[in-house]
Image (tube, helix red, strand yellow):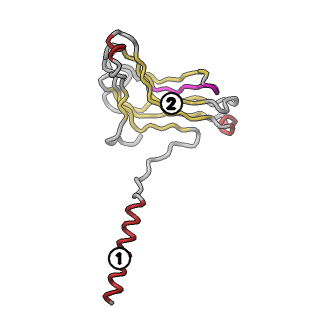
Amino acid sequence: GAAQGDQQVNMFSDYNNQADQTNGNWIESNFFREETVTAAQAAAGDTWKFTFDAKEGNIVAGVDATAFIKIFAPGFAFVDIFTFDTSKGQLSDTWSTGEVSVNIQSGWENYIIQYGFQTIVQNNLGSANFYDNVCFDTGTGCPLPSEIPVPAAVWLFGSGLLGLVGVARRRKG
């Protein structure tokens, strides 16, 4: 993928939940987005791919970490999950690319597809991994990062400034 920049996702557990963390309860944290399958997408039967670059953070053995695609029927009835293991020892301390994919079925119109990252941890164990260049391809390819547009206010200010310069020149002439 593209080179990593200054903006990455650092996925880790919920350390604000100290009562459950210190009592040995398992705490699940999810970071995800979701898409609804359209009739056309269900009919096309494409393979949807969730790709990302990842490297190991301070995650320790005993912490479950995954990249996932979850499938829910309308009404949020759980159907299936597809995962890529990002637990301790599955990633290195240098960037590598991971992928999770799912074949969209013809009957999946209005199904919810969630994709993202998950950690399950207890006792305040280290659980962080780093993710970058995240892409969810629904059969049309991953969009390339675009340049950051100049805000309209800057354009408006610039055109107003040019207008004032023009008026000042006209008065002198």
Q: Are marks 2 and 1 in contact (CB under 8 Å)?
A: no
Residue 83 among those drawn in magenta: no
In magenta, the rendered stretch is: 67-75
Q: Position of residue 168 (x, y in %)?
A: 32, 82
On screen, residue 32 above or below 62: below
Nearest the viewer among 53 and 60 is 60
Considering the numbered disc 1 on the image, is that residue within a helix, a strand or a loop? helix
Residue kind at label 1, given as amino acid type: Leu
Alpha carbon separation for disc pair 2 and 1:
51 Å
Residue 71 among those drawn in magenta: yes
For label 1, the residue is 164
Q: Residue at x 39, y 11 (%)?
A: 25
Q: Position of residue 51 (x, y in %)?
A: 47, 34
The quadrant where residue 7 appears? top left
Q: Is residue 42 left or right of residue 138?
A: right
Q: Residue furthest bottom?
A: 173
Nearest the viewer among 158 and 51 is 158
Majority SS type along the magenta span: strand
Q: How many marks?
A: 2
Res 115 label: 2
Q: Is residue 151 left or right of residue 102?
A: left
